[in-house]
Amino acid sequence: MTAEQTSPDQRYAAFRHRPFLSYWAARFLTTFATMIVSVAVGWQVYDLTRDPFDLGIVGIVQFLPSLLLVLVTGVVADRFGRRLIMTLSSLIEAGCAVALLLLTLRGLAGPLPIFVVLAMFGIARAFYGPASSSLFANLVPPEDFANAIAWNSSAWQTATIVGPVAGGLLYGLSAGTAYITAAVLMLVAALLVFTIPKPAQQTATDKPTMETLFAGFRYIWSEKIVLGAISLDLFAVLLSGASALLPVYARDILELGPWGLGLLRSAPGIGAICVAVWLAGHPIRDHAGKIMLGFVGLFGAVTVLFGVSTITWLSILALALLGATDMFSVYIRETLIQLWTPDEVRGRVNAVNQVFVGASNEVGEFRAGTMAALIGTVPAVVIGGIGAVAVAGLWAWLFPALRRVRHLNGRN
């Protein structure tokens, strides 16, 4: 990898732009609050029904809006103010947290009302995602964009590690405490986004047609670098996702118990944060495409290592390396997608990307669980890791333009 260390000022280059600082803080608070809601809802639903299937419904009802509304959310992000969409979405999410609080105080006989609120929560997230990713590209100049990607990813990873812990502690006090805390955090996030000065945005002004609705898909298909980057992540994660099987490793293979499961789940995030902070000071200067493909291959190889490991420290190290290698590919992929996409279709492209990322995680966990049931847990993880290595090699051949990408400061 060609990466040069930057000065301390350059390490924090993205934060020199005050709008990005507000955006970064809002993104952190929103993700943190979402993690609190996720943990609280999971515990509450399981307390009500004692049925693991209902926990699957919790995830599905939040993901489906992104899939069903993909043609709408991207167009909205391209035609209207992205800052306004983020603010309204955060306010709706805060309202959903308050609704969960009121349902809890009133008393629940079943989980159906919770599912209804979560569906609305998922709709808000479906609009928030494309607008958030697209606004991000309007807040920093191209030369600081890679640095902003690293810090933005570190905020997300930190929130996804600390948020569930906070959610569990708050739910230990009461479900109401968890929901009201999440609502307050989302309100603060909405205020932060609202204070961002209105950035320059190339909005779509043509009359909506079927052609404009599918513009995101059409652009991705025509721009092979963007298509290669998005599909690489989709298939690599779909094949090698092992997070759904961590309870099996914690209980039956490593014999760690519940505390060990928490340790296993946090290890990838810790690895990802370390790499994100490192990348903020050591930006990738050259051969970005080859580096991304190489780290996707390493991601698969480390998955194989985790799959065969029966030693606790080695398994934790392998998971930390999983998060680290994935962070390299995420950093490069997200930078390429944003910089290679014209602003007037960026919302629609990000909407498609959001669905692909969500699908790779959800379907990847289903793939892992199904294969584990058919051939065993260890073979399922090992075969998935080998598949990710094969995808990296195949994509290097199928997408030569992606392989030849060198710099991350604009088209090259």
Image (cartoon, rainbow, N blue to C red):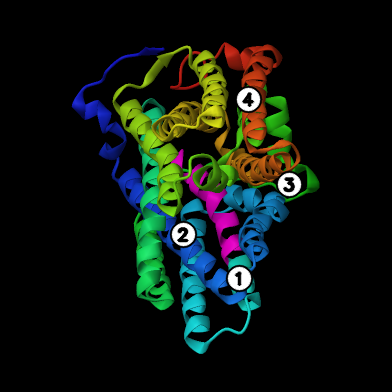
Q: Mark 2 points at which residue?
A: 34
Residue type for callout 1: Arg
Task: State the SS at label 1.
Answer: loop
Which is in the foreground here, disc 1 or disc 4?
1
Task: State the SS at label 2.
Answer: helix
Q: Name the residue under label 1.
A: 50
Residue 227: where, in percent of width, then height?
66, 28
Residue type for callout 4: Ala
Looking at marks 1 and 4 on the same chain, the residue that comes earlier in the sequence is marked by 1
The N terminus appears in which quarter of the rendering? Answer: top left
Residue type for callout 2: Thr
Residue at 39% across, 74% down: 180
Magenta segment range? 121-137
Residue 240: where, in percent of width, then height?
62, 32
In this orientation, which residue lies closer to the viewer: 69 or 207?
A: 69
Q: How far apart are marks 2 and 3 (CA)?
A: 29 Å
Q: Quadrant of residue 402?
A: top right
Looking at marks 2 and 4 on the same chain, the residue that comes earlier in the sequence is marked by 2
Which is in the foreground here, disc 2 or disc 1?
1
Which numbered circle lies on residue 213? Answer: 3
Direction right: furthest residue: 210
Q: Distance between the residues labelled 3 and 1?
A: 42 Å
Q: Distance between the residues labelled 1 and 4?
A: 35 Å
Residue at 64% across, 73% down: 116
